[in-house]
Image (cartoon, rainbow, N blue to C red):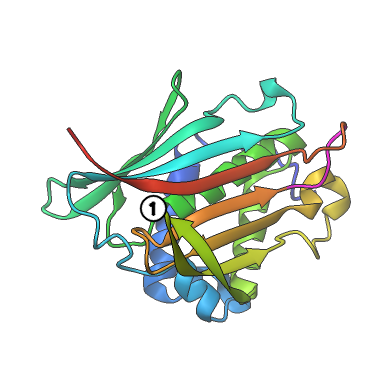
């Protein structure tokens, strides 16, 4: 079973893998997805370059970060409810970099810097949080889960025009939604994650492009979704 191999990610490997993937997808036209990837509007938006150009050095994009669900609390020990901050910094090499940190008031999870020209890293962080949670709750291989999500992202190209709310105003936006395991041969082993749906709302009118990100599984033992994960842009702050 490809989902239950003995290999495990070193602590920093998921972040390194997705950093390379994010930059490679944005710059190389989604070639990392292989033959399943046909560049279209959905992929163009998810992996767009330059979406952080309007964020000044010393500014932070602040996102609300929430994880809820019918899962055993001891299975997910990372930050589950709080704030995600994207801190724009000047790098030692003269290029700008983004540092992402999750904080729930008691715990922090900080990622190594991302290049500021390779898209919005909150997308990578959100996707990797889904991978980690699914691996922890199902016992599946993060390698398998991550690869299936990549393939599903590359294979779909459905974009729906919507209105979104940011900073007290309505802005035109696009919604991209996909179910990464809808046709997976291992669905029966994934429990509620077999029904996982992930969606993104994006708008040119907001800094960083992403207005919100949501994922929801099928029901857990008590009838509620086993997990809901949500990220939403709250605003821009200037560092003190």
Residue carrying label 1: 167
Tell me which segment is drawn in magenta: 217-221
Q: Quadrant for residue 153, please give it.
A: bottom right
From this view, report whether residue 147 is shown above or below residue 74.
Answer: below
Q: Position of residue 83 (x, y in %)?
A: 44, 35
Residue 118 in view = yes
113 vs 12, left or right, is left
Q: Is residue 220 magenta?
A: yes
Secondary structure of residue under mark 1:
loop
Q: Considering the whole magenta stretch, tell me its main secondary structure.
A: loop
Q: Position of residue 120 (x, y in %)?
A: 38, 57
Q: Quadrant for residue 224, please give it.
A: top right
Q: Nearer the viewer, residue 41 or 37?
A: 41
From this view, report whether residue 147 is shown above or below residue 27.
Answer: above
Q: Nearer the viewer, residue 167 or 133?
A: 167
Q: Which residue: 55% across, 50% down? A: 127
Q: Which residue: 49% across, 48% down? A: 232
Residue 9 in view = no
């Amino acid at each position: 079973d490809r989902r239950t191999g003995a290999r495990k990610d070193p602590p920093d490997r998921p972040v390194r893998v997705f950093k390379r993937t994010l930059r490679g997808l944005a710059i190389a036209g989604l070639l990392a997805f292989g033959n399943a990837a046909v560049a279209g509007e959905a992929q163009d938006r998810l992996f767009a370059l330059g979406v952080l150009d309007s964020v000044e050095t010393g500014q932070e994009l602040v996102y609300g970060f929430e994880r809820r669900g019918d899962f055993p609390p001891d299975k997910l020990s990372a930050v589950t409810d709080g704030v995600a901050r994207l801190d724009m910094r000047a790098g030692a090499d003269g290029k700008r970099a983004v540092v992402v940190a999750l904080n729930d008031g008691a715990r922090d999870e900080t990622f190594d810097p991302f290049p500021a020209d390779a898209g919005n890293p909150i997308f990578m962080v959100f996707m990797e949080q889904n991978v980690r949670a699914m691996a922890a709750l199902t016992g599946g291989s993060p390698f398998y889960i991550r690869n299936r999500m990549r393939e599903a992202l590359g294979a779909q190209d459905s974009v729906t025009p919507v209105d979104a709310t940011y900073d007290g105003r309505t802005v035109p936006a696009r919604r991209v939604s996909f179910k990464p395991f809808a046709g997976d041969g291992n669905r029966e082993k994934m429990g509620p994650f077999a029904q996982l749906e992930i969606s993104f709302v994006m708008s040119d009118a907001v800094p960083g492009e992403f207005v919100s990100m949501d994922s929801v599984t099928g029901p857990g033992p008590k009838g509620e979704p086993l997990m809901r994960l949500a990220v939403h842009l709250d605003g821009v702050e200037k560092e003190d």
